[in-house]
Image: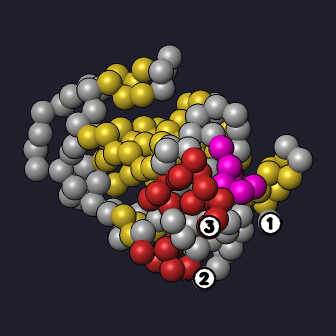
Amino acid sequence: MNIQPFTVTIDFAENVMRGADQHNVRRASAMRGYYKDAAALEKLIRDGNDPLHYETFEKHVPEEYGHLLFCISKIQPGVVGNEFFMTKGHYHTKAGTGEIYLCLQGAGYMAMKTAEGKFDAQRMERGSLVYVPPFWAHRSVNTGAEPLTMLAIWPADAGHNYGDIEKEGFPKRFVNRNGKCIIE
Ligand code: ZN
């Protein structure tokens, strides 16, 4: 589909996208089943009034071959038990499609895995550009004290497959041990 060129503004002070079409919010209650310490997550939902976990700001483009989707993804700092806040993680429905993540704020990791069980974690801080190759599921983890904000760009026809990660999980977790992030 042929559409008109357009511009959006990334606000580098607030680390948000101005003029986004869609603002998706995931609260702690959306993360049931993803953290090892389920009781700690329930406590966070109950005592913390189901706090904001992560959010995305997205612009609509046709979800078809040739177009590029992009979003600002922002994960709050925190832990569930001793496990750092993270996104659910996904494969692409068209598994043979990659993605680029540029870190704008904060610190953490891009955790990646393949269906064959390979695992990789790339450190992210402001200015890090992580290349997620085709076939690698990906999840971002905030190990810092401020929001972890990234710009992501991927083929618009890639689609999201969350179900396989919901079943498989990731082989390693990012935990806070005496103030240090340990990948175990
Ligand atoms: Zn993706």
From the image, state whether disc 3 or disc 2 is nearer to you: 3
User: Is residue 2 located in the magenta-colored stretch of the structure?
Assistant: no
Q: Residue at x 80, y 66 (%)?
A: 184
Give the number of the mark in front: 1 or 3: 3
Q: Amino acid at mark 1?
A: Glu
Residue at the spot 51% in from the left edge and 73% down from the top edge: 165
Q: Which residue is mark 1?
A: 184
Quarter of the image where one finds residue 33? bottom right
Residue 112 in view (yes/no): no
Q: Residue at x 42, y 50 (%)?
A: 26
**Residue 159 % position (x, y):** 32, 63
Q: Are marks 3 and 2 in contact (CB under 8 Å)?
A: no
Pointer 2 residue: 116
| Label pair 2/1, CB-CB below 8 angstroms | no
Crowding near pointer 1: few (<14 within 10 Å), some, many (20+)?
few
Relative vertical location of residue 116 with respect to residue 123 in this rendering, above or below: below
Residue farthest to the right, as pictured: 178
- Could you tell me which secondary element the residue under label 2 belongs to? loop
How far apart are labels 1 and 3 at the CA level?
A: 18 Å
| Pick the front one: 79 or 55 | 79
Q: Is residue 82 magenta?
A: yes
Q: In the rendered image, which quarter is residue 125 located in?
A: top right
Q: Earlier in the sequence, mark 3 or mark 2?
A: 3
- How far is mark 2 from mark 1, CA to CA? 19 Å
Q: Is residue 169 above or below residue 65?
A: below
The quarter of the picture where residue 119 lies is bottom right
Residue 117 in view in this figure? yes
Tag 2: residue type? Glu
User: Viewer-proximal residue, 133 or 118?
Assistant: 118
Instruction: Check disc 3 and report the residue beneath it.
Output: 38
The segment highlighted magenta reads 78-84
